[in-house]
Image (cartoon, grey):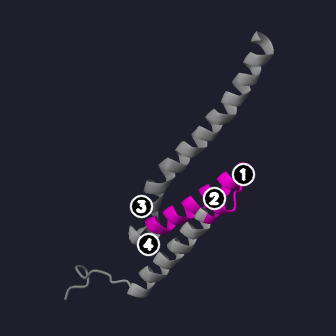
C-alpha cells in the first residue's frame, strides 16, 4: 500500500477517553445549576466547560490536533479576532452609556 494514500488510524481508546471526559465536563456543567451558583461564577464556569468541550471536539473528533499549524491558525484565528472585537465593543458600549447618562440625563 502506498503510504501517501494510507489513512491514519487512531486508537479507539483515545475516542473513548475523550467521550468520558466530555461526559465528565457535561456533568460538571449540570452541577453548576444543581448547586445554584449565581452571578459571574455561574456564567464563568458554564462558559469554561463549554469552551473545554468545544475544544476537545474540534481537536479530536474533527482531527484538528493532527493538522498543520497553518491550517489550525487559519480556522481558529478569525473567531478569536471576532471575540476580541466583541470585547472591545462591550467596553465601548459601557463607556458610551456612562457618557450619555452623565451629560444627557
Q: Which residue is mark 2?
A: 33
Q: CA distance from mark 4 to mark 3?
A: 15 Å
Magenta span: chief secondary structure? helix
Residue 11 in view (yes/no): no
> On the picture, is 57 further left or further right than 30?
left
> On the picture, is 10 further left or further right than 91?
left
Going from the N terminus, do you reach mark 3 or mark 1 first?
Answer: 1
| Residue that appears at 63% across and 58% down | 33
Going from the N terminus, do you reach mark 4 or mark 1 first?
Answer: 1
Q: Residues within 10 Å of mark 3 (few under 14, many from 20)?
A: few
Q: Position of residue 57 (x, y in %)?
A: 45, 67
Q: CA distance from mark 4 to mark 2?
A: 28 Å
Marker disc for residue 60: 4
Q: Are marks 2 and 3 in contact (CB under 8 Å)?
A: no
Front: mark 2 or 3: 2
Q: CA distance from mark 2 to mark 3?
A: 37 Å
Q: Residue 103, located in which quarter of the rendered image?
A: top right
Amino acid at each position: 500500500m502506498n503510504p501517501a494514500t494510507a489513512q491514519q488510524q487512531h486508537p479507539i481508546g483515545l475516542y473513548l477517553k475523550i467521550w468520558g471526559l466530555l461526559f465528565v465536563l457535561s456533568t460538571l456543567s449540570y452541577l453548576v445549576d444543581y448547586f445554584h451558583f449565581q452571578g459571574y461564577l455561574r456564567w464563568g464556569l458554564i462558559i469554561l466547560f463549554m469552551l473545554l468541550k468545544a475544544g476537545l471536539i474540534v481537536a479530536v473528533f474533527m482531527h484538528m490536533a493532527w493538522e498543520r499549524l497553518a491550517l489550525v491558525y487559519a480556522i481558529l484565528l478569525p473567531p478569536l479576532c471576532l471575540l476580541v472585537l466583541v470585547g472591545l465593543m462591550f467596553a465601548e458600549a459601557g463607556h458610551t452609556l456612562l457618557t450619555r447618562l452623565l451629560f444627557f440625563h
